[in-house]
Amino acid sequence: MTPATDVSKSPARIAGMFDAIAVRYDFLNHLLSAGIDRRWRKAAIRSLHLSGRERVLDLCTGTADVAIAARSATPRAARVVGVDFAGSMLRVGLDKLRRERLTDRITLIRGDAACVPVATGSVDAVTIAFGIRNVEQTTEACAEMHRVLKPGGRLAVLEFAIPANRLVRAGYLWYFNRVLPRVGRFVARHQAYEYLPASVGAFHTPEQFASVLRGAGFRDIRTKPLTFGIVYLYTAVRP
């Protein structure tokens, strides 16, 4: 397997890759998605049906965009804890929190999604956006999300997928495999954006991932395609 298509997901490799692109990460996310990534995150937060009293855990928080969205929503989360194992990503996120004066309500912690440094049954909602496919131990991460949620707590997961529609899929794969890696490599000066399409192709289908969530103990699992099915929003509840 060539480095451009290497989808191995050891924590050290993934953390190093995201650390290398941390400074340009937000810019490239918005550029490569034409700004639609903001809508996806807002949709995930809306699905939690926040009341203003919740403590939200955002796993694979990266530069804290979802954590900020949870705190900026109406109604908004009372507290947000963001967890990520890429130190440079967290430093960029902390700079954003300071600029927006959110450090009193959002806490960023370095940690692994497969072993979350949060007490059992201590949060009302869990989010993870475009990070679950990068976790080496997907089943363990889903079990951890179930563990930290209070009974009745809600889960919202955003992840890329291969569109089912043939025409959409053809255009999507052309962009994903040809355009996105070149733009990402030019701007970030790194091969991380060659890993992206390979990792999406290697990840579970929506049906398979829903089955993983079910196996972790979640119920009321729903899979909602966004933007012609290039992204899926998975929602679930801890009974």
Image (cartoon, rainbow, N blue to C red):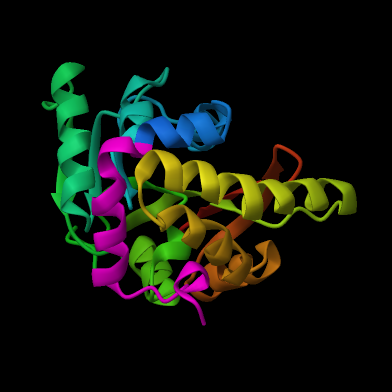
Which residue: 81% across, 52% down?
A: 170
Going by the image, does 142 lie left or right of 148?
right
Which residue: 54% across, 26% down?
A: 35
Going by the image, does 192 lie left or right of 87?
right
Provide residue 89's location: percent of width, then percent of height.
23, 45
Going by the image, does 155 lie left or right of 149?
right
Q: Quadrant of residue 85?
A: bottom left
Provide residue 167's location: percent of width, then percent of height.
88, 48
**Magenta stretch encompasses residue 5:** yes
User: How many numbered tags mark residues here?
Assistant: 0
Which residue: 34% across, 45% down?
A: 124
Question: Is 173 above or below relative to 108?
Answer: below
Residue range in magenta is: 1-25
Which residue: 64% across, 51% down?
A: 178
Asked if one can make out residue 75 in the rendered structure from this viewpoint, the answer is yes
Question: Is 106 above or below relative to 147?
Answer: above
Asked if one can make out residue 148 in the rendered structure from this viewpoint, the answer is no
Between residues 172 and 44, which one lies in front from this camera angle? 172
Q: Residue furthest bottom?
A: 1
Question: Is 144 above or below relative to 173?
Answer: below
Q: Residue furthest right?
A: 166
Prevailing secondary structure of the magenta residues: helix
Provide residue 149's location: percent of width, then percent of height.
34, 55
Between residues 123 and 30, which one lies in front from this camera angle? 30
Going by the image, does 159 lie left or right of 104?
right
**Magenta stretch encompasses residue 165:** no
Between residues 100 and 32, which one lies in front from this camera angle? 32
Provide residue 20's location: percent of width, then percent of height.
26, 52
